Amino acid sequence: MRTFFPSESCKETHLNALNPQSWLQVERGKLSKVSPHSPSSLESLIKVPDPPILPFFKPVDYVEVLAQIHKELETCPPNERPNLYLLQFQVFKGLGDVKLMRRSLRSAWLKASSVHERLVFGAWLKYEKRGEELISDLLSSCGKYAKEFGLIDIGSELPSVADASLPDGVMMNRNYLSGTVSFRIGDEKITCDRQKMAALSPPFRSMLNGCFLESISEDVDLSKNDISSTGMRIISEFSLTGTLPEVPTDLLLEIMVFSSKFCCEKLKDSCDRKLATLVSTRQDAVELMEYALEENCSILAGSCLQVFLQELPESLNDERVVELLTSANSLHRSIMVGAGSFSLYCLLSQVAMDLDPASDKAAFFLEQLVDSSENSRQKMVAFHMLGCVKFFKKEYEESERFFEAALSEGHVYSVVGLARIGQIKGQKLESFEKLSSVISNYAPLGWMHQERSLYCENNEKRWEDLEKATELDPTLTYPYMYRAASLMKKQEVQDSMAEINKILGFKLAVECLELRFCFFLVLEDYQSAICDVQAILTICPDYRMFEGRVPASQFQTLVREHVPSWTTADCWLQLYDRWSAVDDIGSLSVIYQMLESEAAKGVLYFRQSLLLLRLNCPEAAMRSLQLARQHASSEHERLVYEGWILYDTGHCDEGLTKAEESISLNRSFEAFFLKAYALADSSQDPTCSSTVVALLQDALKCPSDRLRKGQALNNLGSVYVDSGKLDLAADCYINALKIRHTRAHQGLARVHYLKNDKPAAYEEMTKLIEKARNNASAYEKRSEYCEREQTKIDLEMVTRLDPLRVYPYRYRAAVLMDNHKEKEAIGELSRAIAFKADLHLLHLRAAFHEHIGDVSGAMRDCRAALSFDPNHQEMLELRSRVNSQEP
């Protein structure tokens, strides 16, 4: 198996020269092997890259920062709110919460105090929602239109320039002069109304009514002022009417330059507005932006910028656009975007980094972001991001300078960049000491110990730091990967697999799947290897292995040669077995294989989307759902998938409409199931349960496979339980279990509990635990049917299996508080809050702080929690109560 892995020499090979066949010597049914007695080979083959330096704002105490932002939002002037919401967005980005990131951007957009800020944040939201155009189309088909982030008429948002007026004393009495004046341009004369022309600007007023020779002349030569006779006639007409006629762009530009030269502000404003209406393409915007910046035309500049932003990210592949935006000085930025310079370059920097984090354009935009920073918090964000990009570009001296600047502004996480650069320079001990200083000066976090582990003198100390990192933040993937790889190199196979499975049990990280794939190759377990690589390709179809050098699809092709082929019937049996065992990754693999041969792909992509939602991969799930729609075999099937797309994006009523349209065409299981699901979620009428029951019964009468019928029976049982019909519910769950819908054990346990039979409920959940591969939720549910000691044991198991589940922390904290161990109770919650940003944890900790009289701690947690949900009623009440106690 040695040839499966890239050697050290391969790492410097050009990408196009890499050939997986040279790593995987493929003969029919045979692979070359790594001897079990060659640990030195494994040492070089199984490598875990250092954890990445994250280019995000990562405060040491995100709760304190969110609380401070919320406090400022309550009292600050309206014009400061958008940038505060932008900072809140940066915090949520560092926490990895996409939903909250979008909400903060939307708040910034809604609270924008200028048209430029609305333009930037609207474009940003559009960029974040790229790929969701189908949802807008589907909403339109339901009669619901949402053009929130369309083009803005910038001219209509900005005030017009008033007529220039000067005191009458400035004019001289020239009653003996004609009321007209002729402007000579070349051989032509343009006759104008002297006083109307004088009213255009102070320079014209002085020229025609002041103390100059032209003031007593009826013939003024303007031949050397870059204006054509045609242009002068239009200016004359404008002096009389105050409006510009429809004229070619070139002529408008000529008039605009002239008006700027002679300070004709109203004429210039009219040109500015007229030119802005002519910007419709990127080519228009590129050509006109330079004029706009040179002549200080903010409406035209804003209109050009709007085109660039609406076309993100494609517009940043246009070097002309990049040059215009990265070469702007402070005046140009003010012309383009007013006071919104920081938000603009935040957006442009993010897009550029999404395209290529090691690109020159990313660095140029971040340099503009640094120049646009106005306060310490903005500076630390800008400096850190620029330090990261310079590091990715291997410009280490520059990178070090920016990381130091970010650190001096208070961004402690930037020490990671400084430590890496120190290691590159051979200063490993200094890097270790930097992290040790941070650990001793701040409340330690998982990333601090993870980073320090890279600079430890020996493996024992490194292992200790990584164990501490996992204790403080069990969501960090690197410690599990390092430990698993180390154990595999020692040929401690069982422990190695157990270690990597720990993280994959609650966090489906593709880099961990890749490492386990490598382990399976070493063990020559090709069936398991192909399962993992197919799961990787389902989540990230373009994923590249071995630090981005080889497409995962190539390995999938190569490994497939060494596993038995399954017939369609085999695949369905495998899917049924794995679905019943709650083996979601295994189920994904089977569906991936079926999609390569099955004709009816729509239903398979739909099943895939259900699994991906269970595995907390919402983006991949939506992609699969859209593919299901694309491959639907009929109109009524397509309508069902459209209904689920709308439902999953929060448009429940529209999803219900699609279900009804589908039923009108064909009475299918999926259409009835969707309608029942959407109705149960959207209706506030308690009597609707009878309708939901009828819909699910209609669904069960329609043809479908046992996987879906088991789900329908399970849902029907839940409705019966909520309606108090426990015997009917039990029948549904038992029938679901007969067709191996394993999750029905949980519903049946609930029925036993409601019938006051806790031992039977406990036993039922034990059966689920024994059958399900992913069973953290089953342990959590069983804990409700135990005595206190067993409850504690079950919840400890939940935390070991899935440390992201918050109920165990809340339960343990409540027990400690009941036992008057207030400090320990708050500590239990704080331990989870450090790595899991959760409103319920913050709510409970705030209540505990209030209980012990820590008003400032309670208020901090209230404010931070309201950053997650500003309308959370219980938090608002608690905040109000705590607020009344503040001195």
Image (spheres, rainbow, N blue to C red):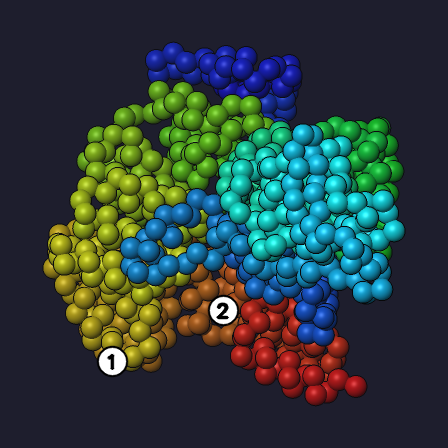
Residue placed most toward the observer, 258 or 614:
258
For the point 61% across and 71% down, the residue is: 866
Residue 168 visible to the viewer: yes
Label 1 or label 2, whichever lies nearer to me, is 1
User: Counting residues from the N terminus, which is met first, the one under dot 1 or under dot 2?
Assistant: 1
Q: Position of residue 682 (x, y in %)?
A: 33, 70
Q: Amino acid at mark 1?
A: Thr
**Disc 2: CA contacts within 10 A as few (<14), some (14-19) or many (>=20):** some
**In this picture, is 803 found above or below 285?**
below
Q: Residue furthest bottom?
A: 884
Q: Quadrant of the C terminus?
A: bottom right
For the point 49% across and 32% down, the residue is: 543
Task: Determine which residue is flagged by label 1.
Answer: 687
Q: Amino acid at mark 2?
A: Gln
- Quarter occupied by residue 324: top right
Residue 452 visible to the viewer: no
Q: Position of residue 662 (x, y in %)?
A: 19, 55
Task: Determine which residue is flagged by label 2.
Answer: 790
Q: Position of residue 841 (x, y in %)?
A: 59, 69
